[in-house]
Image (cartoon, rainbow, N blue to C red):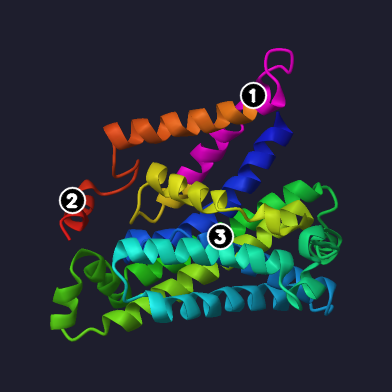
Amino acid sequence: MTGYIISVLVSAGIFALLAQGLNLHWGYTGLLNFGVVAFFAVGAYTMAVLVSVFDWPLWAAMAAAMLAAAVLGVLVALPAIRLRSDYLAITTLAVGEICRIVLHSSPGVVDLTGGPSGIRGYSHDFFGLRETLGLQWMTGLEFLMAAVWIVVLLVLLVVTVMIRSPWGRVLKGIREDEDAMRALGKNVVAYKMQSFAFGAALAGLAGVFFALNLSSITPEAFLPMISIYAWVIILIGGGGSLLGPVVGSVLFWALFNATTFIPSEWMSSQDAAYLRLILVGLLIMVMVLLRPQGLLGNRKELLRESRH
């Protein structure tokens, strides 16, 4: 039971970071991003390659992973940010798939990432920190859980300060009425790009911890379903809410792993996987019908946004 709880909390923490980045894009700026998995993958692979191939220190590789994801965010935003919301969604979805294909089979890139074979041997420095910090009494998974949630809380603090600053209020204004923000002299495109870059950096950071949790990564670990999970978490917790991604992620992963307790003689592992998706689908339907703004979302803000 303890191992189950720790595993759920690790996944919940990782996806809380990913959903926090998506929340910055959509919840606060109104940008439909269905390719958040691309930034997730770039963060994971940047850290893994720098540590295992170039022997970078872990902390430097993590910083570089966030920077690489942010740079990709800017590159995606440059041509796409001026598109209408539905076209932006299609563009970002395509970027997510392009990123996976490049990691899988692009010449030159495969030499670093291992292509379909993946990459491993990058997590020793992280788990070695247990001895450096005198935390040998913790298991590797417990140490990862503690590290992830410390970062989640730090990110929550930073995002809270940013969203409550004048910069954050401009983002909310853009979400509700772009034309009004332009009339007030705000550079809407610049603010959107800043939001996209910062949200992508958070997704890259989530990818780092995702890679550390797996200990080896392949391109097939970064399917479009990752983006769907992040959206489900936002729908559960509530877009435009600081705690929404955190609460939504914990509830999502608790439900997603609930089939662990079904005896194998009652249901095969394949049937249990189908049941997980059915349970998640039912939860989404309930949320849409009873609380479309999510558990912690603001219904008034949702209604204002739907009018534009």
According to the image, label 2 marks what residue?
303
Residue sitting at x 64%, y 25%: 272
Which of the 4 image quadrants contains residue 273?
Answer: top right
Left or right: 266 as drawn, with respect to 130: left
Instruction: Please tell me how crowded label 3 is: few (under 14), some (14-19), or many (20+) other residues with Cα within 10 Å.
Output: many
Q: Mark 1 points at which residue?
A: 271
Quarter of the image that includes the N terminus: top right
Q: Where is residue 34 in the image (x, y as percent from the top left)?
A: 45, 58
Q: Distance between the residues labelled 2 and 3?
A: 28 Å
Lateral position of residue 24 relative to residue 208, left or right? left
Asked if residue 1 can be seen in this view, the reply is: yes
**Front-lying residue, 174 or 170:** 174
Q: Is the magenta stretch mostly helix, strand or loop?
A: helix
**For residue 37, which numbered disc appears in the image?**
3
Tag 1 or tag 3, which sits nearer the N-term?
Answer: 3
Q: What residue type is labelled 2?
A: Leu
